[in-house]
Image (cartoon, rainbow, N blue to C red):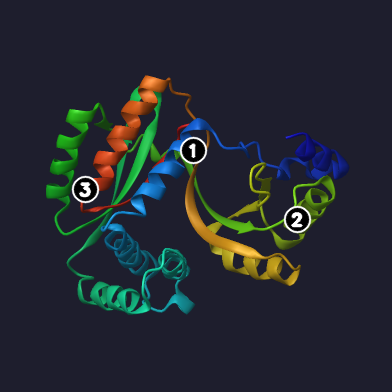
Amino acid sequence: MLLVRQAVASIGGFASLISKRSAGHSKWANIKHIKAEKDGERAQLFVKLCQRIKVAIQEGGSANPDHNLYLAQAVDAARKKSMPLPNIQNCIKSAQADKNKQQVVWYEIRGPRGCYIIAQALSESTKRTRDTLSSILRRNGGSFADNSGKNLFDHKGIIVATSEANSEVLDKAVDDAIDCGAEEVVPDEVDGQLKFFCEMKDMNIIKTKLQSKKYKIVSAHFDLIPKMKVELTDPEMEAVSKLMDRLEEHPDIVKLYDNIA
């Protein structure tokens, strides 16, 4: 993080633009990365990607990616996972046919030591989904938080761009973030990429502005960002990992977010 501090010092009053978020990879981040790689081997991967496309259409109100940032993000994620274009098109058609049958639902789940998991689901019966999730939570040490967890997260747009990890690049990235209207810029100490954080409604505009400044955009997506992260012991982390495995296996679950360090 020394390079980040040097970049901050060089721009004086704009020091707050550099995030306090950890730029490195925590143990939990590494566990989630391994889990994601395993998920990619599952036959159900395309099912989950299709669910995300359906959710995006409901949240964005349009089946046209040009008019729906949520859908554009979901389609981009599906294509990066090698989902065939006909499959994506079928998902979009299916979403339009099922739009009055399925509902996007959020569940807030409390784990050990005050950690939270926010689960996004796509359900035809919210009561059935909650009942089956409740059974999973009882068997795996979780409980519903009932609207006490989502306030612990910020809903942000994240634009990931490639760069080299040196102080000159970081100085320029901070200046460019200010010019483009981003709230924060975070360098990743592992892969050298830069993450620009912004309000969701501004993401497409800021992405275009960064491209005009010759940044190579790796991805642009929405995320729930924890305001504070919770440190867990190894046994607690193992228990939460098992809980999240069981939740991800539920057919209605689309995506999970957490505030674990």
Q: Which residue is mark 3?
A: 250
At numbered mark 2, what does the secondary structure look like: helix, strand or loop? helix
Q: Quadrant of residue 201?
A: bottom right
Mark 3 Cα-neighbour bin, 10 Å: few <14, some 14–19, many ≥20:
some
**In front: 162, or 62?**
162
| Marks 2 and 1 close (CB-CB < 8 Å) | no
Reply above or below: 161 against 248: below
Q: Secondary structure at mark 1?
A: helix
Q: Position of residue 204 (x, y in %)?
A: 58, 68
The residue under the point 36% across, 23% down is: 236
Q: Is residue 19 left or right of residue 241?
A: right
Q: Earlier in the sequence, mark 3 or mark 2?
A: 2
Q: Of callouts 2 and 1, which one flags the residue occurring earlier in the amino acid sequence?
A: 1
**Where residue 111 sits in the image (x, y, percent)?**
33, 28
**Horizontal and vertical percent position of residue 162:** 67, 58
Left or right: residue 135 versus residue 91 is left
Give the camera-side residue of 233 and 57: 233
| Local secondary structure at mark 3 | loop
Q: Which residue is mark 2?
A: 178
Task: Name the residue carrying label 1.
Answer: 30
Above-or-below relation of 159 to 242: below
